[in-house]
Amino acid sequence: MNMEKQQYIDRAEQALYKVYNRFPVVFDRGEGICLYDTDGKEYLDFGAGIAVMGLGYNCREFNEALKVQMDKLCHTSNLFYNVPSIEAGEKLLKASGMEKVFFTNSGAEAIEGLLKIAKRYAYNKGMGTDYEIIAMRHSFHGRTLGALSVTGNDHYQEPFAPLVPGIRFADFNDLDSVKAVWSEKTCGVIMETIQGEGGIYPASEEFLKGVRMLCDEHDALLLLDEIQCGMGRSGHMFAWQAYGVSPDGMSVAKALGNGVPVGAFLAQGKAASAIVPGDHGTTYGGNPLVCAAASKVLDLFEEWKLVEHVREIGDYLWQKLEQVMDQYGCVKAHRGRGLMQGLEFAWPVAPVVKNALLEQRLVLISAGSNVIRFVPPLIIEREDVDEMVRRLQAAIEAGIMNL
């Protein structure tokens, strides 16, 4: 490690809140599916900034759209209309089949919006403020207090209690568990269509359809978190589109902005009219710059036929990871859809992830303590999968030797 890199790390440790255990790498630039550190070393990226960089790094068409908007107008506030937000909103509604959209600054804020829709809908029906929302154990929805309240992980929640009241937890993919906590106060169910941080668990068709039926029977809202699994990553534009059901509301972020911080919550039907003027707002959300980014991302998804590409390359990635599981007895399970897959190990994966990064120049991320998550840029090709597997095998073997 040269002094320049160490100096950057030392400065970061002095200036920035110590809430992340960062690896000793300082990334400087990106190109396609590769990252380059301040020493000029190249890394194959299968983490995509936690499923954010769908178009990869330094995408010329995307960059140009941002530069053009930067020279025109970056911000006006939501007291006025702007063209990029209108265009991005129309494109997102077309891709999702929803009716209304609200642009946010992040995924966590999109979750906050969904929770407010559920509560406002119940309030409008005359339920007052005595209502409950059902969320899933082992879920992850964000770090703000509202999103944290529906995140089913005690480790994240305990230091910040008491959280938002009226949240009851059920087991993902267990419909009887949902029924067991349902009450006359239930106004909505929120869950990830594919659990990400919880270990890459797709919802079963039986479970998702069962929850949809429960919500319909009791006039409650089904809210789906598509922040990580949405925007083509599952092999559908939104993961729920593979199930033959649709939510009342949904959240999206991450790949929507390809690195520009933008999210959104969307709704249809009875949920679309729940929020009224004055109920919600944000200073930066939906400003011209971030919406120009989202608009161009949606254009390129269609132009490049990225969803179809994800299905093809996702199938190939599945085959190769199945081979890895067959090769190593320490790999206990393989789950996922499209380009959101995970390998579950018999022991904590931190040593493998670290070796992959520092020795093999392969960027991987975990999902929980014992799952390696594969969420690369959506533009990867078969040869990129082959190279990733070669480096992954070397990292696994190093991990086995160090046990």
Image: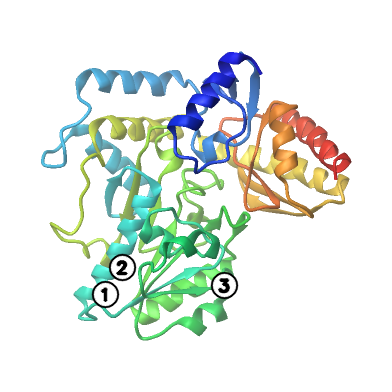
Between 140 and 164, the one nearer to me in the picture? 164
SS at badge 2: helix
* Residue placed under numbered mark 1 in the picture: 122
Which percent across, then down, holds residue 180? 51, 84
Which percent across, then down, holds residue 270? 26, 67
State if disc 2 and disc 1 touch (CB < 8 Å): yes
- For marks 2 and 3, the one nearer the N-term is 2
Q: Image point 27% across, 49% down: which residue?
A: 102
Confirm whether residue 180 shows in the render: yes
* Residue placed under numbered mark 2 in the picture: 118
Label number found at residue 304: none
Amino acid at dot 2: Ala
| Coloration mode | rainbow
SS at badge 3: loop
Q: Image point 16% across, 61% down: which residue?
A: 276
Is residue 183 left or right of 402 when viewed as pictured?
A: left
Q: CA distance from mark 1 to mark 2?
A: 6 Å
Q: What is the total number of numbered labels drawn onto the structure image? A: 3
Q: CA distance from mark 1 to mark 3?
A: 24 Å
Is residue 310 left or right of 108 when viewed as pictured?
A: right
Q: Image point 52% across, 49% down: which residue?
A: 229
Is residue 374 left or right of 355 when viewed as pictured?
A: left
Classed neighbour count for the residue bearing mark 2: other residues with Cα under 10 Å, few (<14), some (14–19), many (≥20): many
Q: Quadrant of residue 115?
A: bottom left
Q: Quadrant of the N terminus?
A: top right
Q: CA distance from mark 2 to mark 3?
A: 20 Å
* Residue placed under numbered mark 3 in the picture: 171
Which percent across, then down, holds residue 7? 54, 19
Amino acid at dot 3: Asp
Q: Image point 83% across, 51% down: which residue?
A: 330
Q: Is 79 above or below relative to 247? A: above
State if disc 3 and disc 1 touch (CB < 8 Å): no
